[in-house]
Image (cartoon, helix red, strand yellow):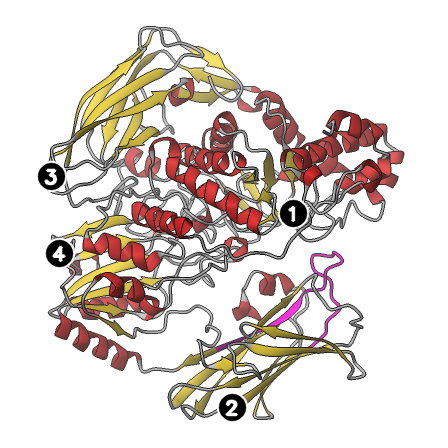
Amino acid sequence: MFDCTELTAQLTLEEASTLLHGADFWRLSGVPRLGVPSGLKLSDGPNGCRGKDFIDGATLAFAVGTALAKDCKSKSASVLLGPTVNIHRSPLGGRNFESFSEDPVLSGKMASGYIRGLQEHGVTAVIKHFICNDSEETRRTMNVVVDETTLREVYLRPFQIAFATAQPHGMMTSYNKVNGTYVGEQKRLLQGVVRGEWGVKDLFVTSDWWGTYSLEAAVLAGMDLEMPFGHFRGDNALKKAAEKDEALAAAVKERAANILGCIERSGGFDLPPETEEVADDDPETRNLIRTAAAEGSVLLKNNGILPLNVTTPVAAVGVFAKVPLAHGGGSASLNPHRKVSPFEGLSGQFDHVQLVPGVPAFFIPPTPTAGVATNENGQDGCDLVFRNADGSVVERRVLRRPWLTCLDEYPQNLAPGWTATMTFTLCPQTTGEHLLFMSAPSKADLYLDDRLICSTLATPNRREDFLQARLDLLSTQTTLSLEGKRNYRVRIVLQSNEELLYATSYKLNGVYFGFLKQTEESDVIASAVATAEQLGTAVVCVGHGNDYETEGFDRETMSLLGKQDALIHALAKSSAKVIVAIYTGSPISMPWLDEVDAVVQCFFPGQELGHSLADILSGKVNPSGRLPVTIPKSVEDTPSFGNFPGTNETVHYEEGLLVGYKHYVTEDVEAMFPFGHGLSYTAFALSDFTIAGVESFTAGKQLRATVTVTNTGSRPGRHTVLAFVSPANVASGRPVLSLEAFGKTRILVPGDSATVKMVFGSDAFSQWEGGSDGHWRVHEGEYNVELRDHAAAPPSQTATIVVARGWTWAGLSG
């Protein structure tokens, strides 16, 4: 048994300083002298259920957290870098798919379930990104200008709820500045608010990767850990600075104590030897992913065509009917055990399904599909050889696809002037024009049958573009006429480049090869229409790949890529019934909405996405998901329009509190689909809405609400109850309502009823006042608690709360 307080007292300044930065890209440092092991492993990729479903008590999020804990342990990881609770300020946000919602209460409560699922099974959760990392453009230098009330009620509130209800043991700071100072250097927020005002104990704070910008300031502000490695704090730099500064030396010991606490809570003192990562494809986890995906899918439109009879012939149309869009890109991207495509999922439940190619819809040409690029052993992938300048072979590797990224995993004994040669056999499936695409941050030459085809040039100061998969900015491409079923020998030679990344000790290099058959889009569309008309029903799968919805950049438009809209328009004009399945993490424009028969928003639902789509379309699962965001009619209608992502490295949060649905409802702006919208195959009625505890409601007390939900339709299903609080008197600039509680029934058969319970505390009726030294206040007056089908719907049930005397409060909850 280790006593962290005693261990901290025994640390030398050098040992304490070493604990404050990573040992490598993913692992913490240790102190062998005191038995503190090195190697506690962190893992990224907070994906799984992305929080698109309202569940009472966030039980589904808890189940997902539990499954993620099991997955972490199979990879010897003790700390998971998630959940992400940043707010969807704009539908164009590149990383929206990784966060839960535009609403802070929904975000915080879903995060709570996720965190408890992880930590109750021995894995530390690191909630992120603290704070206001709500866009990706110039995120390392962006300054967010936001008033204190908005900061408290919108952007800090998900963190506040999560700490109040789940106590995450870790928190990651964001890259950006807030009101002129990097978040990781803001003592007022890290020490004053989180550890002081909120009273959060047992917490370690880490930087985002390369998100430390100073030596002393971040340590004094409360950032415990610099990741990865130790650009600022390593090489005894922190020790030497602390030897000259007593306050810094004391802060170093305090930060080290927090790191030791993390190691202890994560089981690091009893850490077994790290084993080879295991792909644990557990059937129970498969079913959980499938359930979460179906429960979280939202039926946006249905003119009566759904659910389909399984005997209905179906055309599965589009490139994404075959290529499954399971997740977004960047650090949240995954390598799932498998990916079930919509075509495969539909084929498993419907008697007759025909795959129909769609128009190209890739932001970056994809790597070759199965059987097109093979290594010398005839397996999918390629061979890679590292050589030093004298031609000597340093290392050989086999890659699963022609995409190499090197950051800290270079071969030993590799000297400046090295080359990496990638070779594979390319076998086009059909004859015709093909696009050959190559991206690299250094000079790279692409040869086809020993003939130089194209080259990239070294691109100084643009290496992060390659790291963040902005491959289009570092690319070259050419179109060649190739013969189908003929083998071509491809050789790519990548030159070394000694330029450092982010002015650190990292030398990023790599190369990417994309390959795409060129098609005449009008012919593809005409063929799709003909097949759809023959079969009678088309399920069109559209969306964005993880090369387009990813971290590092934001989208410029809500439109679908390529000619996907044109494909849907053409199908809608045919005699076929048209169902659109959308695989995106953010809202898109839908110029064809009035022309199609049904629309399902699937988001990025994970590896079982094909099965979950078939479950919804066949009626095996009654749709019960609700939108966690507003889908606007146009980006110009959004509250952040004109202030997203920012200009001159500054963004003003001028919409204030009116984020998401609060803008649309308060300003009476009609959305395409409002927050909370979601259709069902059955019908429900609400009755007997009561709230107990009103007479004694004051600081520290709770109100307990119940409502009866009855299935009045003809099919079994679940129903989501949304409870909004609406003050009788609303000051200018404040929202007219806000979501404060939600719940969901079990599956109800027709005629069956269930009681949904919800709890409201002081925070549900509070507003921040008084600036940075202020407090929360519950004002006297009337508050309506309204049950609505969605944010823009009229209340179906209302209860009025009268606060005779207001009060103020501070801390995590009132």
- Work out how far the residue at label 3 is from the one at label 4, CA to CA, in angstroms: 17 Å
Residue at left 79%, top 73%? 416
Q: Which mark is residue 41?
A: 1
Circle 4: residue type: Ile
Q: Secondary structure at mark 2?
A: strand
Q: Secondary structure at mark 4?
A: loop
Q: Is residue 740 left or right of residue 115?
A: left
**Which region shows up in magenta?**
494-514
Badge 3 or badge 1: first in the primary sequence = 1
Does the rendering let one see residue 320? Answer: yes
Where is mark 4, residue-wise?
305
Residue 506 drawn in magenta: yes
- Work out how far the residue at label 3 is from the one at label 1, CA to CA, in angstroms: 51 Å
Circle 2: residue type: Tyr
Q: Residues within 10 Å of mark 1 (few under 14, many from 20)?
A: many
* Coordinates of residue 89 in the picture (x, y in percent): 43, 43
Badge 4 or badge 1: first in the primary sequence = 1
* Coordinates of residue 60 in the picture (x, y in percent): 38, 39
